[in-house]
Amino acid sequence: MLLHTSTTDGTARHGSPLWLHADWIAVLIEGILLAIGVAFIYGAGVEVGGDLANKWYRQLAWIGLGGGIYVVAATVDYHFWGRHSWLLYLGGVALLLIVLLFGRTLNNTKGWLLVPGIGFLQPVELAKPLTLVFLSWLGTRPALRHSSLGEWLPAIVLTLVMLLPVGLICLQPDLGTAMVFIPVTLALIFLTGLRWRWFFLGFGILILITPLLYVSLKPYQQDRVKVFIGPPATQLLHLTAPMLSKQTEAHARESLAKFLEPREGEGKSDDWNAVQSLLAVGSGGFSGKGYLKGTQHVLGYLPRTIAPTDFIFSVIAEETGFIGAATLLALLTGLMLCFCRTALLARDRLGTFIAIGVAVIFTTHIVINISMTIQAAPIVGLPLPFISYGGSFMLGTMLLAGLVQSVELHRRRAHLSFASDPGESDEQEEKLNT
């Protein structure tokens, strides 16, 4: 049967506006998350004063600009972005090269460009959606899927495409953001048909080479790993001590102490942010201290400069407690489910790849950001989507969300005829993308 069609003027061929077919549940959740972010950025600033009190104004401005990007990305058929994705990808790579040559260094990372009249922008936040679209387009190419190499050619091609921007990001170095590219690439490779056993093999190899990866980290990055590993490793050793011989226990304690000891000429690894963030989350209790009544960031225990950005969840948990934190997690989970629903209902593989890719990127940010505020992951500087303060991150977030909305808005177009099979033939899909 033929499905609903749309025209280039943004209206459906049957006369209904294109935006009537939007995923309004996702739009509502996104709006609520943005409002929560502004409210707590305002709270974190107004309680402290100074320049921090104006951050919520700037966040509103970035949301307004991001909203325009969201509308454009959603209204334009995602196949247009797919057809031109190689240009978008090269543009993203070019930005990463430019920032390495002419960028500014902030927080040990040379990843910022000073744009007159706007301020500092972080090109990596735009490289994420641009790379995702190109990876999605490549993953749906019949020539790759039906090659003589079978399931391996798409995996090899997608991995090589991912490694170029990741390598440039690691040179900044911004390993936290670089990590985001890995799970989304693996997810898209899985969608191309690579079997589970190869993922398990790759995971095993990754575990084996982890010590080599640790040695290659910069000193401050190694300190973050030590801060994360130290407390649980010490506790685990304490719990297993009764089951170990005296000699084994002594050797284990000596090895752990040697690993955690500071470098020559330096003090103990700085775990201040991690500890204060955990105290902020725990002190909120069940119902929280109340809006604008948080103390950890106001008194400066949780550094005021990072409270509205990477540690905004700590502020929310302290002031709203378990109830507020759980509500926020429910909203974020609901949005990810909306994205997955869009992926399932997409009219072709490209739409599925884009929607799943965005869901994986956001989920990676959410899991790592919240985990690092409760010492369940190393502090790697990944913000919370729609919530954390940041101009570049807001623009990238809205672009990603707009791409998913484009898949939803255009899934009813009747360029293809659907029979009993919910998928399409390769010939139909290739015709649609060209």
Image: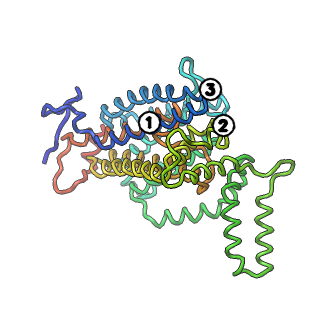
Q: Which residue occupies 46% across, 50% down? A: 363
x%, y% of residue 10?
A: 23, 29
Measuring from the top left, give residue 143's x and y in whole percent: 37, 49
Lateral position of residue 83 relative to residue 8, left or right: right
Q: Badge 1, how many Cα within 10 Å: few under 14, some, many 20+?
A: some
Instruction: Tell me the distance, in whole angstroms, between the alpha carbons under discs 1 and 2.
Output: 27 Å
- Residue at the disc numbered 3: 50
Task: Choose mark 3 or mark 2, whichever is in front.
Answer: 3
Say which residue label 1 marks. Answer: 86
Which residue is depicted at the point 30% across and 39% down? Answer: 433
State the residue at coordinates (34%, 45%): 350
Q: Residue furthest right?
A: 265
The numbered disc on residue 219 is none
Q: Residues within 10 Å of mark 2 (few under 14, many from 20)?
A: some
Q: Is residue 242 left or right of residue 71?
A: right
**Gap in angstroms between the C-alphas marked 1 and 3:** 44 Å
The residue under label 1 is which amino acid type?
Answer: Trp
The label nearer to you, 1 versus 2, is 2
Given residues 2 and 26, the one toward you in this image is 26
In the picture of the structure, the residue carrying the numbered disc 2 is 109
Q: Which tag, 1 or 3, sits closer to the chain's start?
A: 3
Q: CA distance from mark 3 to mark 2?
A: 25 Å
Q: Secondary structure at mark 2?
A: strand
| Residue 204 quadrant | bottom right
User: x%, y% of residue 407?
Assistant: 31, 41
Mark 3: amino acid: Gly
In the rendered structure, which disc, 3 or 2, sits on the residue that comes first in sequence? 3
Q: Of marks 1 and 2, which one's residue comes earlier in the chain?
A: 1
The reply to whether discs 3 and 2 touch (Cβ–Cβ < 8 Å) is no
